[in-house]
Amino acid sequence: MRTPWLRPLLCTLPLGLAAFCAQATDYPTKSVRIVVGFAPGGASDIVARLLQPELQKRLGQPILIDNRPGANGNIANDVVARADADGYTLLLGNPGPLVFNPFLYKQVPVDPAKAFAPISQITESPMVIVVPSNSPLKSVADLVKSAKAKPGGLTYGSAGNGSSMHLAGATLQMRTGAPLVHVPYKGSGPAITDLLGGQLDFMPDSRSTTMPFIRDGRLRPLAVTGDHRVGDLPQVPTVAEAGVPDFKVTTWLGMVAPAGTPQPVIQRLYVAFSESLKEPAVKARLDELGTYALGSTPEAFARSMEQERKEARQLVQQTGMKIE
């Protein structure tokens, strides 16, 4: 067991230990950048900006949001993986760039399993399948029937190839045999705009993005993609209840840092995120957006992603999804 006098002594000896102690006590001393791999207006961006002021209070430094959309988060992955492992550049990612991409692409710029140190899983959320309010589709059964009857099938948008929305659509196609045409965008915000404009037939998307449009009547929910109904849409069935057995595809957001970031810095960030998520105003806003706050430990987040990577490999093999 370390005694109180030992820590100062260690910090005066080897240079590496001195640096370790400084990082533990001084971080942060300047602004922290959170890189978001999707366009402004999407679910990732909304949550990042919701947490921004709370993190600034707890870390005592400006928090900068840096949107780097493209390649289903691979561009943002590359930016953060190349950054110094000092805690001043972080990545807010979802299952696409942090779990699925290595199985979907022939090559990725970085392997997220090796390139990043987990900080915390921030949220988890079942998605909701939505259509424009003037769509004739009233249920998942209608959607499947219409897709099979329409030449070329129905179109759906997503935040990019390999995103959770893409995976939900591909899984629905695999389970039902309905021809569904995927249209990738650089973020769910632009995809929602085209859905509202009638350029797409439907879309599986995060409730944090779709709920404002559901509430104002511009989008109609057909089903949620989790294994149980959600409190903000109690009348909306799960996809499984709607006739597609064992269907479950959820999305989440998690924070990571470049691999090699000192553990005291990781712990400092974990505490800041965990405390921010417990703020009543933050929890209320996330509940309003239909997203559950988690704030898991770095160790729990690491275990969760490891399990999801095993499942992702199997899903990609079964669906035949590939991104060139």
Image: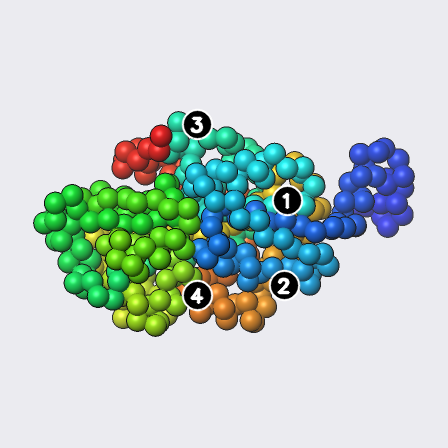
Looking at the rendered structure, the kind of residue marked 4 is Leu
Q: Which mark is residue 89?
A: 1
Tell me how far mark 1 sits from mark 2, CA to CA.
Answer: 17 Å
Q: How is the image coloured?
A: rainbow
Tell me how far mark 4 sits from mark 3, CA to CA.
Answer: 35 Å
Left or right? Give the position of 309 relative to 147.
right
User: Label 2 neighbourhood size at 10 Å, few (<14), some (14-19), many (20+)?
Assistant: some
Left or right? Give the position of 158 relative to 178.
right
Residue 88: x and y, percent? 67, 45
Q: Secondary structure at mark 4?
A: helix
Looking at the rendered structure, the kind of residue marked 3 is Gln
Tell me how far mark 3 sits from mark 1, CA to CA.
Answer: 24 Å
User: Label 1 neighbourhood size at 10 Å, few (<14), some (14-19), many (20+)?
Assistant: many
Q: Which residue is mark 4?
A: 289
Q: Residue at x 39, y 57 (%)?
A: 206
Q: Which residue is mark 2?
A: 54
Q: Earlier in the sequence, mark 3 or mark 1?
A: 1
Q: Which residue is mark 3?
A: 107
